[in-house]
Amino acid sequence: MKTVITILILVAPLAAHGQLLKCVSKDGKVEYAAQCPPGTKPLQTGIKNEPTRTTTKGETKAKTLAEREAEFKKRQLDATEARQKENEKAAEQAFNREACDNARSHLKGLEEGQRIVRVDPKTGDRVFMEDTDRPAEIAKAQKVVANNCK
């Protein structure tokens, strides 16, 4: 008895992998089986037990450790480059802001009539700006403010 049960247990999974057919005899009697007996007409039921596939043509296989590590390094490099660009952009904005502040303070000093001192390139002496030169210098300072303060 034990051998019969053992054989049935071993054979049962094999039937699960088959296709189920609807068998109709000449009398009209319907029977379902994996194989139709002789003298019956087999009809498809649409029930099939196909083995499951792990991957299809459109799917990619699991990535290897080397591929994942390469992708990680690429993401890390991209993040480093992005951080570096952000830092450069912030430094440039700070430089432009400082240039704008300097240009505005120079223009304000000119408009308020502060004494402006320059060094004469020929003699190296300090020379004070004349009041007649002030309007031209104010116009230059306004252009610098317009260019640096956007």
Image (cartoon, helix red, strand yellow):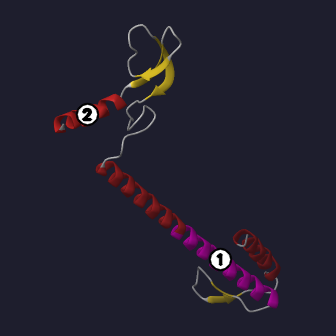
Residue 105 shown in magenta: yes
Q: 109 or 128, which is in the foreground?
A: 109
Residue 21 visible in the displayed image: no
Residue 106 shown in magenta: yes
Q: Nearer the viewer, mark 2 or mark 1?
A: 2
Q: Which residue is mark 1?
A: 97
Q: Residue at x 45, y 58 (%)?
A: 78
Mark 2–mark 1 Cα distance, whole angstroms, equals 87 Å
> Which image quarter is the N terminus in?
top left
Q: 91 or 130, which is in the foreground?
A: 91
Q: Which residue is mark 2?
A: 8
Which of the 4 image quadrants contains residue 61?
top left
What predominant SS class does the magenta segment belong to?
Answer: helix
Q: Is residue 81 left or right of residue 113?
A: left
Which of the 4 image quadrants contains residue 101?
bottom right
Residue 88, position as x, y percentages in the image: 52, 68
Under tag 2, what secondary structure?
helix
Disc on res. 14: none
Residue 8, position as x, y percentages in the image: 26, 33
> So how many labels did they put on this image?
2
Q: Amino acid at mark 1?
A: Arg
Name above or below for residue 86 compared with residue 2. Answer: below
Q: Which residues are magenta?
A: 87-112
Name above or below for residue 139 compared with residue 40. Answer: below
Under tag 1, what secondary structure?
helix
Q: 89 or 52, which is in the foreground?
A: 52
Q: 42 or 117, which is in the foreground?
A: 42
Q: Amino acid at mark 2?
A: Leu
